């Protein structure tokens, strides 16, 4: 029989074997074979109970203690490297715009700077915390008073930031910024938020793929200033179709300096409002918009005295020339109004954003562009896709007059026709909506598919409205219907 | 001159680690924390020590400690089967009088780790790790979750092996598993407390977690030794080790894998990495196990430290790196190769010191009762905790001790104590940490 | 296979679905965790729940001080007799012989169909790593008992009993004077069936979504398929099938190389799926990069070094005794 334990266990053999059946039981206090109790040293028993007690009750008391403990409030200037990982509170004023970091359409974080009078600290919220803040509409803005708690991250080169671990630990006291005139913009307002109102006199859009911001020149009675915002703000504008020259805006922005010039920075889409009606008129009254922006001219009135100025011009697109693949040449559009014509040029960065560009041939449009001369020829240069507005879509054949409903027969199946009439009602169908067009000779269904004419573009189509519709004649379950391709195929009639 | 400073720093750090290493329970990160505080204090008085001195010094300490700490881990602790459920391989060697051999085998593993880090990882890391990190970065959270899941699911019941089928047998089996789950949850709760409402003074918050780790791991080890009723038998000093090159290679493979995982992934420690690699490589041979333990420990601590300096990587892993980050911004190839050089030098010195140091400790334990040594170690680490974090730190350490004793005394895995970091950080990374903290009432 | 291989295979399977990775990128680890958890669940159910409730008719409990091989052999033979007499399946549990915290007396059981007998041999003391302690193999003590009938073997002829929980044999009367021997009848029974996988999947669907159901089913099924590579097989369509379908005999559950290969391959596949679904990655990683840096180079280098190590220092002995399943491997000789 060999030693059945580790060497030197003889001193505790009685404690590791069952006194009843003699089998090895090790650290157990009851023999698993015969059920006999196995005596252990008092110290071992005490330790077992003490461990359980300390680990459970002790932890519970520790938990109670910390729950009632205040998170320490610290001064930013008093933060030292040994405070790395400390959970602290900081109170002060938001000293920067809040920046939202995205990857694709996912919010990955947000950050802002807090100044407590003794120094500044960057505050960061990541992922779910950042998303929770945004969804709860908690968005610190420059000038707001804030108390925020989180864990400190202190690394070499005095890089200190406060990581917000929970949205509940950010207490914001929004401070309503003052309304000012654009001429009152000054150095004193640097780092503060203000509210301004004005008319859009220039729009400089970033090229696709560029990281440059949008720059909007705003004009009021007192003067002008530049607004800047990034693509994420533009993408979040609910009415960005209305961001055109001449639009009247109310903006909350923070005052900053860029290359020596003061500018107004917009950090949220919600901070940019389009004014309408009396409010808009109140703002734009007295603003020499046309003179600043440019006048409306006819194509024949574009002359060399207007070189360098922005003008607005309307007409029918007579031709559209696409540049050769790989070439640096611009798109060339000829605009004519029956009295004359003018050449309008734009590059791919504008063309890319114009929907159904090639279908504009024959359509009536208005353009806003800068007059320039190239090789002795005058042309209008468009800088922005919003500078090209469709007034009236092309007809199926520019000479053809609209048909009456009764003239739409099975012979026309597959052909494009134009009809006029009144919208007599609508009903939803899977993937779209069917309007009924009525005129004196009858009624016909007009089908608009969501994928071609999204719902929001149809909002203005109310019952009783007089419209002109161009579309393809089709047959469905034995009945004829007209299917327009785009919203531009539907025009409101006076 | 820089080269001389680096050599002196690395040698000094390694020699300092010898003093540190023989004290059981004392962790190199505790001492590095003190050094960081010292450096900051000196800087505030206008006295600066250049990074070409303190970085190699710290590297030397970490490498030296990783290697030499094997000595007290194997030699200064006799398992008492009346108190413990599991006997570790190193302890088996000790109890059969082969403690010297067990220590040296582990040391060989450590040397293999240095060669692995310097000759393989060193040249390849700047090229391979940045793309891997970029791919893995958004996925660290679920990696922690699957590690947690595996740790909890893979623990095997120790009891329930005897007797008729039924609930009694089931409860007998689940006693140890229940202790494991309880340990994990208690540790996790402690982790949430320390993460959101640490009672440790914010002035020394960079050592927030130190009292808890001391309590979870170091103090139970000391206490169990003091409790033990076992005598350490006479140790035999051998002239050769019973290992083949194949054992070394397998040990380096398994340990490198485990230590590497632990170094690269946040929160994953050497123990977790060792568990995963051990399971993945299906080790059985205790010699390979000891070798891999030596490799894993050194790769984990030194590798994590090294990652701070890998150009183009930009990650911080391990307590040492986090503390050094407050002093120095790394990222250049100069720093990287300096640290690699310091690692190579200190690894060689530390391995050469293993033999005389092991023999000295063996002579010591023949004269001094290991229980007394453990009591002294306990006093030292308690003093250290008090010095850095005060009474509240000692209180946290006491609570953590209660949690850390559970696995030892009730037969579950000590790894479950890592719930202190694993669960809170996994929750935070997944974005639910603040919800859990709110439910616990830790955020208002 | 070992638990980690099953677990990581489940995670790898889950990673093939884009919703798993996209959810993970959004901070939701659900699908990947489900894949891993259900990859390990079949064995968890068996070893941590079911086996404690599995009843036995006969318990063989050798005396740790003087284990008697004859007593063991007689008890086994008696179990077979009882099965024939009572015309029902008799389950015999063989307990291990624990001697210390790290010591177990090993013994082996051999069913010899030709001789019509069962032999028992008392082996050395082994540690928990199943490594024999030198000098503990006493003079050979064997015994045998005649079997009362013909036997049909469904598993190994020789079973080693050593650490932790001992094995179970089920003796099922299967014909005229014939008994079929089932090894570990409680293992890989209903828990390792595709029907249960489907049931778990339905539950997952009810709790979460069909996506969770897919991941659950696949993770669970991967475990079953991996086990079919071995010897024992599983009862694949319980309750529609009643017996385990034998495996392909390609590997043993704890063979190191297949386990490691599975884990390594699964990790590479997971990484590859992360690359595939990664967004805005600056570094381009191709399949070839992964194969070379993740497979060929490290494993090739290790293999070369292994050959060098063996040439230089000799080969590590293959152990006669268990290096694989804790449930026993054939004793040689």
Image: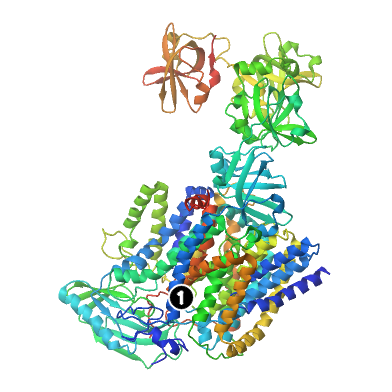
Splitting the image into 4 quarters, where does residue A50 fall? Answer: bottom left
| Residue at x 62% of width, y 21% of height | A275
- Eyeballing the image, is B133 above or below C299? above
Label 1, residues with CA under 10 Å away: few <14, some 14-19, many ≥20: some
In the image as oriented, which residue stretches furthest toward the top? A440
Q: Secondary structure at mark 1?
A: helix
Q: Is residue C127 above or below residue A423?
A: below
The answer to which of A111 and C234 lies nearer the viewer is A111
The C terminus of chain A - image quarter: top right
Which chain letter matches label 1? A
Judge left or right: residue A36 versus residue A302: left
Residue B134: image location, x then y, percent: 62, 53
Q: Is residue A91 left or right of residue A376?
A: left
Is residue B296 placed above or below A326 in the rendered structure?
below
Residue at numbered disc 1: A47
Q: Position of residue B66 (x, y in %)?
A: 63, 74
Please identify the quarter of the rendering in which residue A374 is found: top right
């Amino acid at each position: 029989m060999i030693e059945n334990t580790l060497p030197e266990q003889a001193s505790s053999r009685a404690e590791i074997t069952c006194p009843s059946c003699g089998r090895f039981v090790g650290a157990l206090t009851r023999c698993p074979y015969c059920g006999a109790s196995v005596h252990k040293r008092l110290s071992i028993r005490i330790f077992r109970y003490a461990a359980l007690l300390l680990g459970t009750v002790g932890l519970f008391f520790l938990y109670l203690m910390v729950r009632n403990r205040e998170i320490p409030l610290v001064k930013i200037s008093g933060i030292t490297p040994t405070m790395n990982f400390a959970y602290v509170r900081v109170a002060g004023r938001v000293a920067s715009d809040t920046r939202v970091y995205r990857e694709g359409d996912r919010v990955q974080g947000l950050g802002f700077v807090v100044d407590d009078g003794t120094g500044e600290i960057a505050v960061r919220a990541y992922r779910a915390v950042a998303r929770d803040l945004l969804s709860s509409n908690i968005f610190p803005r420059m000038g707001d008073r804030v108390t925020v708690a989180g864990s400190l991250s202190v690394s070499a080169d005095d890089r200190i930031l406060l990581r917000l671990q929970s949205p509940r630990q950010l207490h914001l006291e929004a401070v309503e910024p003052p309304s000012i005139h654009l001429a009152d913009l000054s150095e004193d307002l640097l780092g503060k938020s203000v509210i301004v109102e004005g008319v859009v006199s220039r729009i400089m859009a970033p090229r696709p793929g560029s990281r440059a911001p949008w720059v909007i020149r705003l004009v009021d009675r007192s003067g002008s200033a530049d607004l800047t915002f990034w693509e994420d703000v533009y993408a979040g504008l609910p009415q960005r179709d209305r961001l055109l020259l001449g639009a009247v805006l109310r903006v909350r922005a923070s005052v900053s300096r860029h290359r020596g010039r003061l500018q107004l920075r917009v950090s949220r889409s919600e901070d940019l409002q389009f004014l309408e009606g009396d409010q808009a008129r109140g703002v734009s009254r007295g603003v020499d918009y046309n003179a600043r922006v440019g006048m409306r001219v006819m194509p024949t009135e574009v002359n060399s005295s207007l070189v360098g100025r922005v003008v607005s011009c309307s007409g029918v697109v007579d031709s559209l020339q696409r540049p050769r693949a790989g070439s640096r040449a611009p798109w060339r559009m000829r605009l004519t109004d029956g009295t004359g014509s003018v050449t309008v040029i734009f590059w791919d960065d504008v063309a890319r954003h114009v929907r159904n560009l090639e279908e504009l041939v024959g359509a009536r449009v208005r353009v806003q562009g800068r007059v320039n001369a190239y090789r002795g020829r005058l042309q209008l240069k468009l800088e922005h896709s919003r500078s090209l507005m469709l007034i009236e879509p092309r007809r199926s054949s520019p000479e053809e007059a609209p048909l009456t409903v009764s003239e739409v027969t099975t012979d026309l199946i597959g052909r494009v026709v134009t009809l006029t009439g009144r919208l007599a009602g609508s009903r939803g169908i899977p993937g779209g909506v069917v309007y009924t067009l009525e005129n004196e000779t009858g009624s016909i269904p007009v089908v608009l598919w969501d994928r071609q004419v999204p719902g929001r573009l149809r909002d203005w189509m109310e019952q009783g409205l007089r419209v002109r519709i161009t579309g393809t004649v089709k047959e469905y379950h034995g009945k004829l219907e007209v299917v327009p391709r785009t919203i531009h195929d539907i025009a409101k009639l006076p | 001159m820089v080269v001389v400073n680096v050599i002196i720093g690395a040698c000094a750090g390694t020699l300092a680690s010898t003093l540190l290493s023989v004290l059981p329970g004392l962790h190199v990160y505790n001492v590095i924390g003190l050094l960081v505080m010292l450096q900051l204090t000196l800087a505030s008085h206008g006295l600066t020590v250049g990074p070409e001195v303190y970085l190699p010094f710290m590297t030397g300490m970490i490498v030296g400690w990783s290697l030499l700490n094997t000595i007290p881990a194997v030699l200064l602790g006799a398992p008492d089967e009346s108190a413990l459920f599991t006997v570790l391989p190193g302890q088996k060697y000790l109890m059969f009088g082969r403690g010297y051999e067990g220590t040296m085998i582990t040391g060989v593993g450590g040397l293999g780790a240095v060669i692995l880090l310097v000759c393989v990882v060193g040249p390849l890391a700047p090229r391979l790790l940045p793309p891997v990190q970029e791919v893995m970065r958004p996925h660290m959270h679920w990696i922690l979750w699957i590690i947690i899941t595996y740790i909890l699911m893979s623990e095997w019941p120790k009891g329930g092996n005897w007797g008729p089928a039924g609930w009694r047998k089931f409860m007998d089996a689940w006693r140890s598993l229940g202790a494991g789950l309880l340990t994990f949850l208690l540790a996790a709760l402690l982790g949430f407390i320390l993460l959101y409402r640490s009672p440790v003074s914010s002035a020394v918050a960079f050592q927030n977690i130190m009292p808890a780790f001391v309590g979870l791991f170091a103090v139970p080890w000391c206490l169990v030794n003091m409790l033990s009723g076992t005598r350490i038998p006479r140790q035999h000093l051998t002239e050769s080790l019973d290992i083949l090159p194949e054992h070394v290679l397998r040990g380096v493979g398994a340990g490198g894998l485990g230590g590497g995982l632990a170094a690269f992934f946040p929160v994953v420690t050497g123990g977790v990495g060792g568990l995963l690699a051990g399971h993945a490589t299906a080790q059985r041979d205790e010699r390979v196990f000891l070798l891999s333990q030596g490799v894993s420990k050194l790769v984990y601590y030194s590798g994590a430290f090294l990652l701070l300096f890998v150009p183009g990587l930009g990650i911080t892993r391990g307590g040492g790196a986090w503390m050094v980050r407050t002093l120095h911004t790394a990222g250049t190839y100069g720093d990287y190769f300096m640290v690699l050089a310091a690692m190579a030098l200190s690894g060689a010195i530390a391995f050469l010191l293993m033999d005389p140091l092991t023999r000295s400790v063996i002579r010591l334990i023949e004269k001094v009762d290991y229980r007394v040594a453990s009591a002294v170690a306990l006093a030292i680490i308690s003093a250290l905790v008090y010095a850095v974090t005060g009474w509240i730190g000692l209180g946290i350490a006491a609570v953590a001790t209660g949690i850390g004793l559970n696995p030892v005394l009730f037969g579950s895995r000590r790894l479950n104590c890592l719930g202190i970091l694993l669960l809170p950080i996994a929750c935070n990374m997944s974005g639910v940490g603040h919800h859990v903290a709110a439910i616990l009432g830790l955020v208002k | 296979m070992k638990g980690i291989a099953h677990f990581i295979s489940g995670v790898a399977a889950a990673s093939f679905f884009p919703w798993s990775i996209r959810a993970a990128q959004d901070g939701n680890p659900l699908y990947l965790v489900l894949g891993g958890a259900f990859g390990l669940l079949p064995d968890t159910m068996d070893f941590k729940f079911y086996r404690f409730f599995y009843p036995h008719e006969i318990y063989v409990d050798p005396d740790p001080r003087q284990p008697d091989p004859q007593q063991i052999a007689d008890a086994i033979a008696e179990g077979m007799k009882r099965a024939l007499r009572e015309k029902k399946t008799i389950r015999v549990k063989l307990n291990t012989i624990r001697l210390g915290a790290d010591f177990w007396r090993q013994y082996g059981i051999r069913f010899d169909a030709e001789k019509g007998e069962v032999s028992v041999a008392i082996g050395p003391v082994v540690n928990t790593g199943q490594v024999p302690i030198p000098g503990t193999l006493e003079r050979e003590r064997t015994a045998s008992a005649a079997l009362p009938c013909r036997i049909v073997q469904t598993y190994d002829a020789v079973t080693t009993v050593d650490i932790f929980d001992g094995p179970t044999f089920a003796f099922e009367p299967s014909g005229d004077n014939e008994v079929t021997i089932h090894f570990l009848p409680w293992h890989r029974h209903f828990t390792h069936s595709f029907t249960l996988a489907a049931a778990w999947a339905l539950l997952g669907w009810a709790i979460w979504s069909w996506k969770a159901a897919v991941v659950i089913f696949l993770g669970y099924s991967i475990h079953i398929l991996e086990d079919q590579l071995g010897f024992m097989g599983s009862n694949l369509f319980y309750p529609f099938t009643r017996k385990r379908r034998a495996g392909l005999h390609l590997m043993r559950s704890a063979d190191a190389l297949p386990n490691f290969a599975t884990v390594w391959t699964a990790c590479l596949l997971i990484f590859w799926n992360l690359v595939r679904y990664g967004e805005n990655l600056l570094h381009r990683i191709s399949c070839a990069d992964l194969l070379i840096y993740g497979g060929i180079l490290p494993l090739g280098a290790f293999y070369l070094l292994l050959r060098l190590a063996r040439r230089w220092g000799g080969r590590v002995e293959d152990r006669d005794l268990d290096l694989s399943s804790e449930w026993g491997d054939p004793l040689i000789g």
